[in-house]
Amino acid sequence: MKKRRLGKSELYVTELGLGCMSIGIEEKTAEKIIHTALAEGINYFDTADLYDFGQNEKMVGQALKDVREQVIIATKAGNRWNQEQTGWSWDPSKAYIKEAVKQSLNRIGTDYIDLYQLHGGTMEDSIEETIEAFEELKDEGFIRYYGISSIRPNVIREYVEKSNIVSVMMQYSLLDRRPEEEVLPHLQANDISVVARGPLAKGLLSERMLEKASQKGYQDYSYEELAEVLPALKESLAFPRTLTEVAFQYNLANPAVASVIAGASSVEQVKNNAKAVRGNPLTNDELAVIKAIAKETYYQDHR
């Protein structure tokens, strides 16, 4: 599987990464999913301390322990579970991040984290303090690089200007084109990579299409609009491609994108996603068709 450089870092991530949140809590099933990803050539595994109260990090670390030096493990911090584990609060403080990383390292069973990400962020945060925490962790050798996971243009701009982030994880798909106008060009100009999550738009951009649709629609699309747009995309582009292949290749066509993170709850999903990413890149004509069918959208909030 092809790899792309993550920002200015020395990390080269596969074009498809495994989003580990979906692997579940049954150890054998989770291990099969991760090992299938390895067999498909995937080297990039994304987890978070928030997932399953840290259990997800444990399973990821256990499944990858024999290939630790050959893979890139990304995790996230900033959400603090309450003692009852019934909810969490946002805590991007330096003290909490520096404590959280030790717990993540212990759960994963590793001496370092390849990519440590802030799991959110607001303009009300003490951003300079948060950056200081990540910089210290990097200097101390606990993390190799850091990034943020955010869809807030105002927060992203602050980190681009003030920090040494190498990546921004954000929701992006051909049904959610909000990043295209302002965020992706800005990140590319600053040599910061995008890790795209949600490429299949909650399953809408799969062969199941409207079976996965909510009556409320998706993002700026009503259900009625989805009923028009999805068949139009399939009819215009999918054959002999699958709609999943179209979706992944659309994200990868943007030069700001280093990797597409897709979750999987079965071995078959991993294989199908890998096959889609190995497909042929979209042509300029195909991209033009997509942009004519899928409407251009913009961030309305977080200004």
Image (cartoon, grey):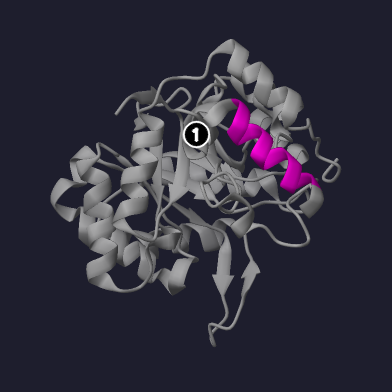
Q: Is residue 132 magenta?
A: no
The three-letter code of the residue at mark 1 reads Phe
Of helix, strand and loop, which mostly describes the magenta segment? Answer: helix
Q: Which residue is mark 1?
A: 248
Question: Toward the viewer: 26 or 184?
Answer: 26
Q: Residue at x 54, y 19 (%)?
A: 255
Whether residue 107 is visible: no
Q: Which residues are magenta?
A: 225-236
Depth check: give the residue in front, 46 or 247: 247
Residue 50 position within the rendered picture, expressed as x and y whole percent measured from the top left: 50, 66
Q: Is residue 228 shown in magenta? A: yes
Q: In front: 104, or 256?
A: 256
Residue 268 seen in render: yes
State which quadrant residue 31 falls in.
bottom left
On the picture, is 71 further left or further right than 200? Answer: left
Q: Is residue 205 left or right of residue 178?
A: left
> Residue 244 placed where, x, y %?
49, 39
The residue under the point 58% across, 64% down is 79
Residue furthest to the left in view is 66
Q: Is residue 246 above or below residue 221?
A: above
Question: If the image is split into quadrants, where does the C terminus sit?
Answer: top right
Position in image of residue 104 (x %, y %): 38, 61
Where residue 103 appears, x then y in whole percent?
Answer: 38, 65
For image coordinates 63% across by 63% down, the residue present is: 91
Element under disc 1: helix
